[in-house]
């Protein structure tokens, strides 16, 4: 039985692809295999006539990434989770793709990642292998494990938290079953979305206190161990995939974030969406001065052949301090492969746009270290 729609059993990597995924040399990977003692299947087990090359599963790759973390072979970025909101009030710019690919890249580097789908369209949820409206019967028909069913969303966690704050005496239920692990326990985690996520907007209208800071308070209490089954401190990165519209959810995600990651589609006029995002961040900062997220702009759908790109680059000069030095090229591979319920990074580890997301993730790690560095200095000063 499969745990997601993705045909994960059909994804088998050779050593070279795994080295690319983990971003290590093939020699280093061989040493890791020797030192970790991890058992990897050999091709000649099923077919004695074939050479005894190792065949890695997706789960094996995340187990190796986890082992690297346990051996402290990765840089520690911060002692508390870094919250990233992938947001732009504009549709189809690459938010869900970026949230998924960056989330996978961070997990492959050994970081503990939680992705939260905040969009009723559930694109991130699908990218990670789930169909949000799947019923128990349909799951059985597709030979899917009951884990493949979305039984609750971030709305479930937030509404019971808000109810408990409203003094209705609500006892918080354990929410651990809402946290999915599409690639096994060593891989990234997901809080999926379905149409019931829409209830969250309604719930915000009844919230007591500052409605913009609900996610922030929830994370605070979660890190203190007050939310049964959900401790945000267990992650190095929390990534929100925001909807393309203005909503309480995206405002809350911005308010809870250390970094706002705005993908800008270079073959369109999305700079407009960017100025709206900046004024939203500024408005929030005026109302709640403790909020100081760092804006990071990632150009996507990039093509050097389009004259429009150079015009947009000029417009983006106004934001040059926030601009990623690396871009994501326009590539048909993204729409072409999204039906397979797997991020491109895991489908084609050596593809050119995957290398671009890896490069961007490295830059993101330097930004995260700086942002968190500043926070701890501020905390010490106060
Ligand atoms: N770099 C790229 N080159 C070409 N196509 C891309 C690229 N990135 C994403 N896409 C494709 O563009 C479409 C929209 O991407 P995506 O869903 O990530 O955008 P979004 O901003 O999350 O959209 P929405 O606002 O609807 O949530 C998808 O079909 C995706 O596969
Ligand atoms: Mg999206």
Image (tube, helix red, strand yellow):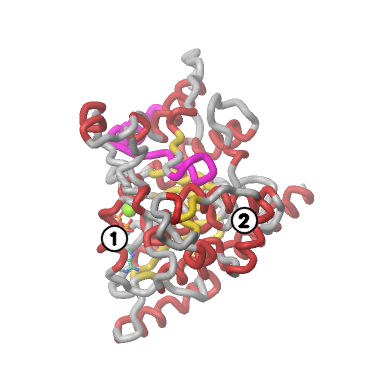
Counting from the top left corner in percent of width and height, residue 146 is at 34, 29
Q: Residue at x 55, y 61 (%)?
A: 22
Mark 2 surroundings within 10 Å by alpha-carbon count, few (fewer than 14), some (14 through 19), many (20 or more): some
Q: Mark 2 near ligand 1 (CB under 8 Å)?
A: no
**How far across and down, in percent of the image, does residue 233 sit?**
62, 39
Residue 337 is labelled as 1
How many neighbours does mark 1 have within 10 angstroms: few (below 14), some (14-19), or many (20 or more)? some
48 vs 18, left or right, is: left
Q: Report helix, strand or loop for mark 1.
A: helix
**Residue 31 to residue 223: above or below:** below
| Residue ID at (33%, 80%) | 303
Q: Nearer the viewer, residue 8 or 35?
A: 35
Residue at 46% across, 71% down: 356
Vertical comparison of 330 with 44: above or below: below
Which residue is more in the foreground, 26 or 4?
26
In percent of width and height, residue 305 lies at 31, 86
Magenta stretch encompasses residue 196: yes
Number of the front mark, 1 or 2: 2
Q: Residue at x 41, y 56 (%)?
A: 12
Which quadrant holds the N terminus?
top left
Kindly tell me whether residue 99 is visible in this rendering.
Answer: yes
Indicate left or right for 333 with 232 as reference: left
Q: Is residue 101 left or right of residue 130?
A: right
Magenta highlight range: 183-206
Reading the chain from its start, which is encountered first: label 1 or label 2?
Answer: 2
- Would you say residue 104 sits in the magenta stretch? no
Q: Quadrant of ligand 1?
A: bottom left
Q: Secondary structure at mark 2?
A: helix
Q: Which residue is mark 2?
A: 33
Asked whether the viewer can see residue 271, the reply is: no
* Residue lying farthest to the top in this orientation: 169
């Amino acid at each position: 039985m499969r745990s997601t729609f993705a045909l994960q059993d059909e994804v088998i990597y050779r050593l070279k692809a795994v080295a690319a995924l983990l971003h290590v040399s093939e020699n280093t990977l061989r040493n890791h295999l020797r030192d970790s003692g991890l058992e990897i299947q050999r091709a000649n087990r099923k077919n004695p006539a074939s050479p005894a090359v190792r065949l890695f599963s997706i789960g094996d790759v995340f187990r190796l990434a986890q082992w690297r973390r346990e051996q402290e072979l990765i840089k520690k970025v911060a002692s508390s989770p870094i919250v990233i909101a992938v947001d732009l009030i504009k549709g189809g710019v690459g938010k869900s793709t970026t949230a998924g690919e960056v989330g996978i890249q961070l997990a492959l580097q050994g970081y503990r990642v939680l992705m939260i789908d905040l969009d009723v369209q559930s694109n991130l949820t699908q990218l990670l292998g789930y169909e949000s409206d799947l019923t128990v019967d349909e799951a059985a028909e597709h030979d899917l494990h009951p884990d493949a069913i979305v039984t609750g969303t971030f709305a479930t966690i937030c509404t019971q938290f808000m109810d408990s704050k409203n003094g209705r005496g609500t006892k918080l239920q354990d929410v651990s079953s809402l946290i999915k692990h599409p690639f096994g326990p060593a891989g990234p985690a997901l809080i999926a979305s379905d149409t019931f996520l829409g209830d969250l907007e309604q719930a915000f209208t009844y919230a007591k206190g500052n409605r913009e800071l609900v996610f922030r308070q929830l994370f605070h209490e979660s890190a203190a161990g007050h939310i049964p089954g959900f401790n945000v401190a267990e992650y190095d990165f929390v990534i929100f995939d925001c909807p393309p519209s203005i909503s309480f959810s995206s405002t809350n995600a911005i308010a809870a974030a250390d970094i706002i990651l705005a993908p800008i589609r270079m073959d369109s006029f999305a700079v407009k969406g960017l100025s709206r995002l900046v004024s939203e961040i500024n408005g929030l900062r005026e109302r709640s001065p403790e909020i100081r997220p760092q804006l990071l702009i990632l150009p996507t759908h990039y093509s050097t052949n389009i004259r429009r790109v150079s015009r947009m680059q000029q417009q983006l000069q106004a934001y040059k301090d926030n601009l990623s030095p690396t871009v994501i090229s326009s590539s048909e591979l993204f729409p072409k492969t999204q039906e397979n319920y797997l991020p491109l990074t895991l489908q084609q580890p050596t593809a050119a746009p995957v290398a671009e997301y890896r490069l961007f993730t490295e830059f993101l790690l330097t930004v995260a270290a700086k942002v968190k560095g500043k926070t701890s200095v501020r905390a010490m000063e106060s």
